[in-house]
Amino acid sequence: MAQLDHPASFKLLSLFSLIPHAWATLYSPYAFDPLKHLGRVSPYFEPRDAQPSSPDAPQGCTVTRAAYLSRHGAINVNDDDYEDWIEPFLSKFQNHTGTDWSKIPPLNFLANYVSPFAPGEEPETPTRIGELESTQLAADITIRYPSLKIPSRVWASAPDRTFFSGKAFVRGLQTDDHPINLVSVVEGHQGGANSLVPYQACPAYHEGNDEAKTYREIFTKPIKARFNSLAPEYNFTTTDVVGMILLCGYESVIRGNSPFCNLELFSPDEWLGWEYADDIRYHYDVGYGNPFSGIIGFPWFNATAELLMRETADEDLYVSFSHRTLPSMAFVAMGLFNNSAFGGTGAAINDTMPLDRINPRRAWRTSEITPCLGNLAIERLACKGSYGFEDGDYYRPLVNHAPQPLPGCTDGPGGSCSRSGFESFIEEKEKMFGGFSQRCQVDYDNSTDFVSFYE
Ligand SMILES: *[C@@H]1O[C@H](CO)[C@@H](O)[C@H](O)[C@H]1NC(C)=O
Ligand SMILES: *[C@@H]1O[C@H](CO)[C@@H](O)[C@H](O)[C@H]1NC(C)=O
Ligand SMILES: *[C@@H]1O[C@H](CO)[C@@H](O)[C@H](O)[C@H]1NC(C)=O
Ligand SMILES: *[C@@H]1O[C@H](CO)[C@@H](O)[C@H](O)[C@H]1NC(C)=O
Ligand SMILES: *[C@@H]1O[C@H](CO)[C@@H](O)[C@H](O)[C@H]1NC(C)=O
Ligand SMILES: *[C@@H]1O[C@H](CO)[C@@H](O)[C@H](O)[C@H]1NC(C)=O
């Protein structure tokens, strides 16, 4: 400390404080974790870099009710990922004998590589790890809301990967005195908006048309060229490269790590290329690039907002498990992660996701918003004596425990939304996105625009 009085040190110190970047460069070497940039196969993590707001209730506020909508936990492997990319790569690799991999780093690990999938195994199964993650969410929620009562019901979409996540969550949350009933919500093509996978019941909805292909070819081109210069006889293709990248994610969950995540194999920029291609895919599938996303996501948001706002409700905590589609579409219905929201450039939404180059400032990052077990929470806050704010009820969303401002309604403590502001917010969204059955051009009887399974 005596050093600080020395004039030369003082000069040095003030120089550094003028250029804060110098501190960062000196004391935090560049670090990159591919698991946080894997798009659809990202394991759960809580991004805190862009805007590290506190997940605690704002000053003077307590959470009096909350709703959670979670993607299922980690799975063994998704059917389509396995059939389209991983299996073709593994099968070609296993048939190939003409290369001595041990001689060519960074591919030398392939000499002894054994697939994490047992032959003939049913690919799409929930894993023990995915269930443990879900139990961890129950522990997080228990610690986070000590005064909310344990719910009597939790909801999960019917398939194994969502239902098992629900079961593991219930195991973690319930006590001997308060058993929880896990309600299985049927998936179906004729249920209207009243399910946890309502896109299936929307005939007018179409998935993206593989808009991601352009960027997938761009970012894999130098990788293929590099690998093919090392092993010309193998003829690495886009399918091989994508298969290897997906294996990094799935194998990490199955085995705890994967040789495919090596930064010598794929550079940070290459992982970022993969991540962007996947963000394009989900922009058109379930995000702002699909005209049906908000329409399909709105009924869940509307029903949930109503459960949170009503005077008295059956539960303090409403928790549901679904697939990536519904939280993503609810983000759109709520205006979250809208690439066009700030900046006033008036850029059309599809122009914010150019197909041939990365938009590094995009808000729509699937690795961060819908990793496995990614979740959207909406909290009702009772605030009293929050300096500068009126006493009353306020509402705020959190995504993976990070508070998110509702665009156009941040008039409360900590950027939360006042009750009257929330009411107008919902009305405005209803004008944009209401009318599920009609806009989905429902062609079956008994459709509904409402989510009623929570009642
Ligand atoms: C690998 O060999 C098996 C058995 O000969 C064959 O069925 C399969 O198509 C081959 N896979 C590839 C990618 O060539
Ligand atoms: C390499 O694979 C691609 C894609 O399957 C194929 O079109 C091409 O003919 C192959 N090239 C060689 C030299 O085998
Ligand atoms: C964005 O592109 C999709 C797919 O081509 C299209 O359906 C949608 O209407 C476009 N969105 C806007 C706002 O132009
Ligand atoms: C996204 O933000 C722009 C600019 O504020 C706005 O015009 C547009 O309606 C928003 N889109 C959605 C779906 O909320
Ligand atoms: C939204 O919820 C409110 C309150 O439950 C209801 O009156 C309204 O009809 C709902 N709107 C839509 C489009 O679901
Ligand atoms: C629609 O509801 C009616 C009355 O509940 C029922 O009789 C009919 O079978 C339902 N139709 C379908 C297609 O589910």
Image (cartoon, rainbow, N blue to C red):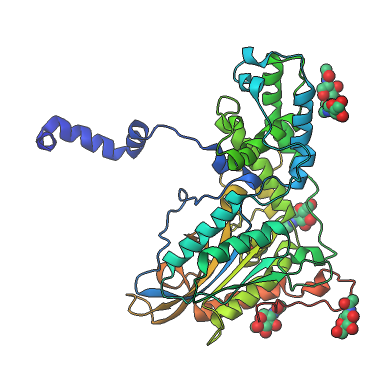
Q: Where is residue 4 in the image (x, y as percent from the top left)?
A: 13, 37
The residue closer to the viewer here, 277 or 195, is: 195
Q: Where is residue 116 in the image (x, y as percent from the top left)?
A: 67, 36
Residue at 52% x, 49% y is 45
Q: Which residue is drawn at the image coordinates 9% and 36% (left, top)?
A: 2
| Relative side of 145 to 69, left or right | left
In depth, the one of 334 and 194 nearer the eye is 194
User: In which image quadrant can residue 95 be found?
Assistant: top right
Residue 191 visible in rendering = yes
**Quadrant placement of the C terminus:** bottom right
Q: Quadrant of residue 385?
A: bottom left
Percent of width and height locating residue 12: 21, 32
In the image, residue 142 above or below residue 313:
above
- Image label count: 0
Q: In which quarter of the image is ligand 1?
A: top right
- Quarter holding the N terminus is top left
Q: Is residue 224 left or right of residue 253?
A: right
Image position, residue 283 (x, y; %)? 69, 52
